[in-house]
Image: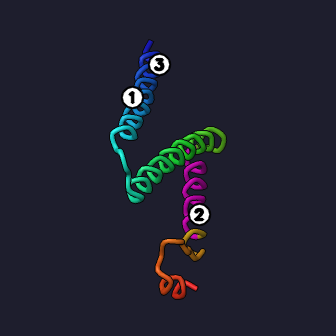
Amino acid sequence: MESFVLALVLTLIAGLSTTIGSFIAILVKKPSSKFISIIMGFSAGVMVLVSFVELLQQGIESSGFILGHLFFFLGMGLIFLIDVSISHIYEFEEPKLKEKKG
């Protein structure tokens, strides 16, 4: 019975989140590009979090608690290092900034 209640609460939260998100989209008539960027970034972050939590759970089940967490965080660190080492050039930046990043 306890797992049924948990499933019901999680489903309710997911449904309400979708409803709240659609109300935000309806209420904001002309969203700025900054607003859209923030909302899209938040949505992408939630999706990545859900994926990572699922992968972490599978890693713990297959490799144990210590190894699962160790390789999970090593992978996050590797992705961070790759992101930092690659130069980023964006269309909206000033031309002088693009030249600096080269």
Can you name the residue that lies furthest to the right here? Answer: 62
Q: Secondary structure at mark 3?
A: helix
Frontmost residue, 95 versus 64: 95
Where, quadrant-wise, is the C terminus in this rendering? bottom right
Residue 59: image x %, image y %? 62, 44
Q: In this figure, which residue is indicated by the disc labeled 2?
A: 79
Q: Secondary structure at mark 1?
A: helix
Q: In this figure, which residue is indicated by the disc labeled 1?
A: 16
Q: Which residue is depicted at the point 40% across and 37% down?
A: 21
Mark 3 closeness class: few <14, some 14–19, many ≥20 residues within 10 Å:
few
Residue 63: image x %, image y %? 65, 44
Q: Nearer the viewer's eye, disc 2 or disc 1?
A: 1
Q: Is residue 100 above or below residue 20?
A: below
The dot on residue 54 is none
State whether the magenta stretch is mostly helix, strand or loop: helix
Residue 81: image x %, image y %? 57, 70
Is residue 74 a member of the stretch shown in magenta?
A: yes
* Magenta residues, start to end: 65-81
The dot on residue 3 is 3
Is residue 7 a member of the stretch shown in magenta?
A: no
**Quick check: marks 2 and 1 in contact, CB under 8 Å?**
no
Where, quadrant-wise, is the N terminus in this rendering? top left
Question: Between disc 3 and disc 2, whose residue precedes?
Answer: 3
Frontmost residue, 75 versus 90: 90
